[in-house]
Every structure is written in structure tokens, then in C-alpha cells.
């Protein structure tokens, strides 16, 4: 429900409220911090972020000890926007005493666990701007004379609710694990995002077989990790292809991730957008680093030579049924060539079946009705990542993710994060800011205010 704008006793007004505090909104907070340091208090942009996790975390279930990033360390949270930033990965390395060691390593691609530590390091530097453990549960329009002047953001922490008021929202709620239709996650049926959180529970149980479904980087990493972690277990990889396809990370193809490519994609006709995604989907989707492909093939060939085959590839096949019982999973694998169906018992089935963007309108309530959509029901998004709205909504609603249909393949990737947050900040500044008017207050008696 909309509510009239009171003249006093209102929540604290922020120029920007961010929903979610993953890498994209950490980068947003850093951009704001650097801007405010340049312009001084009078022109500072006021902001606050809400994150439902108790602390920063990014794909923790896939921080396999030897897994590396698929993007250069130079595509960190800041460098492409501000190469002199004190929040860069190089500054992080210096603070950890590893800068020279990293240079001697001669590698553009850090360990994933190391980049996660970098993210945590950067997030800690701006943690005065975030309330962890706060789940945003509602966004309510605040109306004056028929115009939505502000948006009230309600967040829950335990039994307490807090309300903050925003001139602009930046939604960075990340991705959601995708499972095949009709398959539910359980004790023995996992999504790959659960891998490290779940696998420790298998210690001492002597699993005999794992099934990993999927043909992308995460699937291949799961196969390699489980094969190494459980040296007595069989690991079966199931996918509809003949084998893993290598990622195209060649120099020309990588231009699809350039900031200029976003401009070109945004202005391209719809049929050209589709062709570009078809041409260059193999830079990111359902592809695997060639070194990992070679390692897995070398391993399976060696096992054939030695007669100790634990690594099996059930290719040109798909899983047609998964039935979980307390002590096993009964899976059915169907050959796409012959149609033959083979039952296969396993201790665990892991689905490395990707992610879907969170619904950008899921939290917006009545505000979503004021957001414009295209013919396919997707958000209409302007070049500055702002959702197109009816004229009566004065607030900016910006998306970090969920914009692949308008901005291309970098929508939810790290490659363009630093540039994207700079563009969002420029848009907010260009659209104008007003001074902060009100102090924070509880929603009702006995309900506390947010931590800052």
C-alpha cells in the first residue's frame, strides 16, 4: 500500500539504499566511499546496504582449494574504474604480504579462495555502510500529491523491523541455484553451490559412488574435487554432450566483456542481440577451462590403462529420474542415442545446473506495478541500469544483475562490475540529490532501529 508523506517523524532518508551486499554492491559502496572522500561532506552521497547473511559470503560452497578465477585479477572491484584505488586486488596483496609472491607467480588468475578473501577484505573497509543479518521484506512507495517521492525499505533482523527511506534503490540480490524441474534438493541430492557445506558430512561414511550432472566449469570442478577427495569412490559425470567444451577465452572473443560492448549490445536490434549471445555464449556458459578438461581426460585414460576406472563419463545422456532414500539415491540415466535407460545407485547426486537471476521485482510490492516491462515480461532497463518506470515514480531503481537481455553477457559477471557501479553512481548524481532531512526512528514502540 502507498502511504502519504509525513512532514516529520519520518525514517532517515538515504540518497541510496542497496539490497544485498555481494561483490556488486560492495563495489557500489566503494565507489560511494571514494566519491564522498573527493567531494567532502556537503556533497556526499548518503547510503546504506542491507544483507541477510550474517557476514560477507560469495559462493562459499564452491571455494574449492585449487579452483581459480575465470577473470583477470585486474577485473576486481575497482581497477577498471579507478586504477589508483586503495581497494584494488594489488593493494589487498600488499596488505597480506604477498604482492611480490603473486608477481613471481606470473598468473592473471588468482585462486578463487584468495579472491574471496579479497572481497571480504574490501567489504570490511566499508562495513559502516551495511547492516548484516537484515533481510529486506518490503519496499513501500511514499506518495506526495500523486508522486512517489521516496521508497520505504523495511528490513527484518530476528524479531525486529527497521525502516529506512530511499531516493534510489540499487538491487544486487545475486543468483539463485537452478534445479531441474521436479527435482528437490535434499540430504543426498545437492546443487553444486552446497558442495563444501555438505561434503564434510560424508567423512567416515565411505561413499562408493557420486553422480555429477552438468557440462560447465562447476560440474567439471565438482567431478575433479570429489574424485580427489574420495579416493575409493566412483565419480560419474552425466551430460548430453560428447564431452566438456572448452571456454573461448581468446583475446578477440573476450571483447564481449569490454565496457564498450555493453554500449553496442544495448543499442543493437533484438535479432542482433540474439546472434551475439549465440556467437559468444561459449565464453561463459556450459564451458570448461581447457587445462581442467585435459587433466580430467588424462586421469580417465590413466585409469583405463591401469584397470582402476573410478572416473566415468556417461556422455550423450541425461538423468531422467532421481529418487532419494535415507541411505542412497536411485538415479536413471537415459542414452540420447538409443533411448536405453540404466538405473544407477549413488550416495550423492550433485546438480551443477547453473543459476537464475533473482526476480528484481520480487521485493517491490506495489512499486513493481509502476515498473515497465517489455513484450516478454522482462524489466525494461535503461542504459544506466535504471528500471524504466511510469512518470509518477521519481525514485531510481537500479539493477545489478538480471539485465542480460538489455546489457549483455556481463550482467551478472565480475568483468564489468567496477565500470557498472561507476555508471550507476553517475546516473544518481546526474538525476540530482536533496539534502538529508530526517533522523532514523523505529517502526513502532519496542521495535529497534538498524545498526549502522
Image: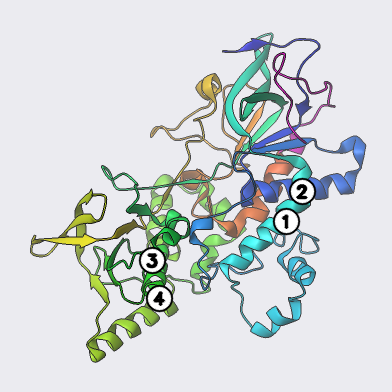
Label 3 and label 2: CA atoms lie apart by 42 Å
Residue 392 seen in the current view: no
The magenta stretch is 428-452
Nearest the viewer among 103 and 63 is 63
Say which residue label 3 marks.
204
Quadrant containing the C terminus is top right
Label 1 and label 2: CA atoms lie apart by 7 Å
Q: Nearer the viewer, mark 4 or mark 2?
A: 4
Say which residue label 2 marks.
126
Circles 1, 2 touching at the beta carbon (< 8 Å): yes
Question: Which residue is depicted at the point 32% across and 61% down?
Answer: 214
- The numbered mark, 4 or 2, whose residue comes first in the sequence reads 2
On whether residue 436 falls in the magenta region, the answer is: yes
Look at the numbered disc 3 and give the secondary structure of its residue: loop
Q: Note whether 207 is above or below 391 in the view shown.
A: below
Q: Residue furthest bottom?
A: 305
Say which residue label 1 marks.
122
Label 4 and label 3: CA atoms lie apart by 16 Å
Q: Nearer the viewer, mark 4 or mark 3?
A: 3
Look at the numbered disc 2 and give the secondary structure of its residue: loop
The residue carrying pointer 3 sits among few (fewer than 14), some (14 to 19) or many (20 or more) residues within 10 Å by Cα, namely: few
Look at the numbered disc 1 and give the secondary structure of its residue: helix
Q: Note whether 293 is above or below 220 in the view shown.
A: below
In the rendered structure, find residue 228 and report the number of the disc placed on it: 4
Res 286 → quadrant:
bottom left
Res 12 → quadrant:
top right
Amino acid at each position: 500500500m502507498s502511504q502519504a508523506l509525513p512532514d516529520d517523524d519520518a525514517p532517515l532518508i538515504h540518497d541510496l539504499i542497496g539490497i544485498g551486499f555481494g561483490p556488486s554492491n560492495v563495489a557500489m559502496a566503494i565507489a560511494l566511499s571514494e566519491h564522498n572522500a573527493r567531494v567532502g561532506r556537503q556533497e556526499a552521497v548518503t547510503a546504506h546496504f542491507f544483507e541477510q547473511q550474517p557476514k560477507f559470503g560469495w559462493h562459499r560452497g564452491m571455494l574449492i582449494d585449487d579452483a581459480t578465477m575465470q577473470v583477470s585479477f585486474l577485473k576486481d572491484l575497482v581497477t577498471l574504474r579507478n586504477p589508483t584505488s586503495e581497494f584494488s586486488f594489488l593493494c589487498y596483496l600488499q596488505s597480506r604480504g604477498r604482492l611480490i609472491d603473486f608477481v613471481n607467480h606470473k598468473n592473471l588468475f588468482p585462486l578463487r579462495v584468495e579472491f574471496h578473501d579479497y572481497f571480504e577484505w574490501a567489504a570490511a573497509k566499508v562495513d559502516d555502510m551495511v547492516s548484516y543479518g537484515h533481510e529486506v521484506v518490503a519496499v513501500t512507495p511514499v506518495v506526495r500529491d500523486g508522486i512517489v517521492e521516496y521508497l520505504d525499505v523495511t528490513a527484518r533482523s530476528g524479531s525486529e523491523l527497521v525502516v529506512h527511506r530511499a531516493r534510489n534503490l540499487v538491487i544486487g540480490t545475486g543468483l539463485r541455484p537452478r534445479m531441474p524441474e521436479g527435482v528437490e534438493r535434499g540430504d543426498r541430492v545437492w546443487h553444486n553451490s552446497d558442495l563444501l557445506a555438505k561434503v564434510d558430512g560424508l567423512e567416515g561414511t565411505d561413499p562408493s559412488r557420486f553422480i555429477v550432472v552438468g557440462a560447465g566449469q562447476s560440474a567439471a570442478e565438482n567431478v575433479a574435487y570429489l574424485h580427489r577427495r574420495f579416493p575409493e569412490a566412483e565419480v560419474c559425470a552425466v551430460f548430453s554432450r560428447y564431452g566438456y567444451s572448452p571456454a573461448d577465452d581468446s583475446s578477440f572473443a573476450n571483447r564481449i566483456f569490454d565496457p564498450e560492448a555493453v554500449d553496442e549490445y544495448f543499442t543493437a536490434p533484438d535479432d542482433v542481440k540474439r546472434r551475439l549471445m549465440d556467437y559468444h555464449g561459449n565464453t561463459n556458459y556450459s564451458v570448461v577451462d581447457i587445462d581442467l578438461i585435459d587433466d580430467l581426460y588424462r586421469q580417465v585414460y590413466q585409469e583405463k590403462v591401469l584397470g582402476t576406472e573410478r572416473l566415468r563419463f556417461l556422455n550423450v545422456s541425461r538423468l531422467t529420474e532421481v529418487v532419494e532414500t535415507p541411505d542412497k539415491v536411485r538415479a536413471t540415466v537415459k542414452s540420447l542415442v538409443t533411448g536405453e535407460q540404466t538405473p544407477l545407485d549413488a550416495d550423492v547426486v550433485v546438480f551443477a545446473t547453473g543459476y537464475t537471476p533473482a526476480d528484481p521485482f520480487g521485493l517491490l510490492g506495489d512499486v513493481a506495478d509502476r515498473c515497465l516491462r517489455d513484450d516478454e515480461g522482462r524489466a525494461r532497463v535503461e542504459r544506466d541500469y535504471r528500471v524504466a518506470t511510469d512518470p509518477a515514480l521519481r525514485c531510481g531503481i537500479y539493477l545489478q544483475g538480471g539485465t542480460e537481455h538489455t546489457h549483455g553477457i556481463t550482467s551478472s559477471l565480475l568483468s564489468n562490475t567496477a565500470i557498472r557501479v561507476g555508471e550507476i553512481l553517475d546516473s544518481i548524481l546526474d538525476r540530482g540529490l536533496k539534502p538529508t532531512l530526517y533522523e532514523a526512528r523505529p517502526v513502532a514502540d519496542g521495535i529497534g532501529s538498524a545498526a549502522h
